[in-house]
Image (spheres, rainbow, N blue to C red):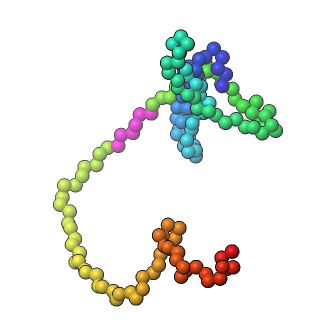
């Protein structure tokens, strides 16, 4: 981003405009991407004389650190803040498609009542299964520990 002659407010507004435009373009072409998000916004500091009145922190961006790819990084697209203020980045709201309503039937629906069947009690189990897991609440006592201390190590 070439930010010459642009302050933080103007730069951040241009980046948000670019983000809205990119999202609209992604939706228009049905792009297989999860989200479009612009990083690298500026710190916006409002001063009153020498006192800070308001601070809006920017969003940091990651840059590649691989020295072998430095020339590739230098050849990426550079946009000027003033370029992003042009009308080609206007996002036109698409008119929502309004579907015609289908009338709902006012006839009474037929209700089928199924007979209620009471469950048959099963024979009582002899012993409950022990459920054990990382948070099962199972306590380890002397009976569960091995008798030979060498087996523990």
Left or right: residue 70 versus residue 138 is: right
- Residue plotted at (62% across, 30% down): 40
Q: x%, y% of residue 109?
A: 20, 63
Left or right: where does residue 81 sit relative to residue 104?
right
- Residue reaching furthest to the top: 49
Where does the C terminus fall, quadrant-wise?
Answer: bottom right
Whole-percent x and y of residue 147?
61, 83
Above or below 77: residue 53: above
Q: Say whether residue 71 is left or right of residue 143.
A: right
Give the mark count: 0
* Viewer can see residue 14: no
Identify whether 140 is placed above or below 87. Answer: below
Say if 107 sits above or below 65 in the image.
below
Q: Is residue 88 above or below residue 61?
A: above
Q: Residue 29 is drawn in which quadrant? A: top right
Instruction: Judge whether residue 120 is colored magenta.
Output: no
- Relative to the observer, which residue lies in front, 76 or 86? 76
| Residue 44 seen by the camera | yes
Q: Nearer the viewer, residue 63 or 141?
A: 141
Residue at horizontal 22%, vertical 78%?
115
What's the residue at 40%, 37% (across, down)? 96
Q: Is residue 110 left or right of residue 53?
A: left
Q: Tell me which segment is drawn in magenta.
A: 94-99
- Horizontal and vertical percent for residue 136? 48, 70
Task: Please tell me which residue is depicted at 63% across the width and 14% down the height of the picture.
Answer: 5
Which quarter of the figure has residue 123? bottom left
- Magenta stretch, main secondary structure, is loop
Q: Where is residue 47 shown, x and y percent of the image?
A: 53, 15
Nearer-the-camera pick, 72 or 125: 125
């Amino acid at each position: 981003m070439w930010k010459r002659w642009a302050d933080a407010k103007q730069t951040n507004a241009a980046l948000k405009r670019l983000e809205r435009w990119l999202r609209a373009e992604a939706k228009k072409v049905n792009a297989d991407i999860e989200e479009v998000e612009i990083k690298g916004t500026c710190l916006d500091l409002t001063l009153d004389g020498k006192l800070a009145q308001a601070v809006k922190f920017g969003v940091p961006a990651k840059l590649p650190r691989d020295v072998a790819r430095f020339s590739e990084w230098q050849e990426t697209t550079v946009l000027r803040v003033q370029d992003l203020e042009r009308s080609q980045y206007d996002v036109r709201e698409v008119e929502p498609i309004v579907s015609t309503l289908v009338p709902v039937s006012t006839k009474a629906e037929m209700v089928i009542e199924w007979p209620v069947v009471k469950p048959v009690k099963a024979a009582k189990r002899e012993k409950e299964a022990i459920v054990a897991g990382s948070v099962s609440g199972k306590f380890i006592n002397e009976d569960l520990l091995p008798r030979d201390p060498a087996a523990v190590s």
